[in-house]
Amino acid sequence: MTGELFVIEDWWYPEQQTPGSTSLARYRCPACGYERLICSPTHRIDKGGTVTPSAVCAFPGCTFHKYIVLKGWPTPPMVDEDGS
């Protein structure tokens, strides 16, 4: 991995984790606000919150493509609306 890490402060765990789920975390793209999933096996999150490989926003027209780190991992700074 090369380059500077982009810190994602706006992230949380998926609302529901079902057996076999691959969703690790959710975040909002800092460029466009589109909600994104970090899923395995495509991505991994190390104990410091660094996500590999890089994150690419899939929203049409958004060009966000950076290496990211989830601030505070594994304790999310946000909770779902239901308080979980």
Image (tube, rainbow, N blue to C red):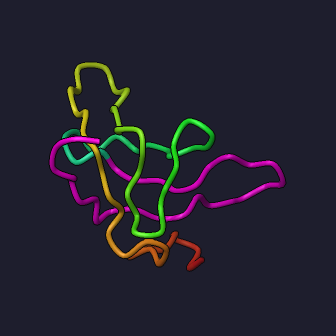
Give residue 70's position: percent from left, percent from top. 36, 62
> Residue lying furthest right in this view?
19
Residue in view at x 23 percent, y 60 percent: 7
2 lies above or below 26? above
Residue in view at x 21 percent, y 53 percent: 5
Q: Nearer the viewer, residue 69 or 17?
A: 69
The image quarter in which residue 42 lies: top right
Q: Quadrant of the C terminus?
A: bottom right
> Residue lying furthest front in this view?
1
Main SS category, magenta section: loop
Residue 20 lies in magenta, yes or no? yes
Residue in view at x 23 percent, y 27 percent: 62
Q: Quadrant of the N terminus?
A: top left
Give residue 31's position: percent from left, percent from top. 19, 41
Residue 21 lies in magenta, yes or no? yes
Q: Which residues are magenta?
A: 1-28
Give residue 63's position: percent from left, percent from top. 20, 26
16 lies above or below 36? below
The image quarter in which residue 29 lies: top left
84 lies above or below 38? below
Residue in view at x 23 percent, y 20 percent: 61
**In the figure, is residue 70 to the left or right of 26?**
left
Give residue 22's position: percent from left, percent from top. 68, 46
Tally of numbered discs: 0
**In the figure, is residue 59 to the left or right of 79?**
left
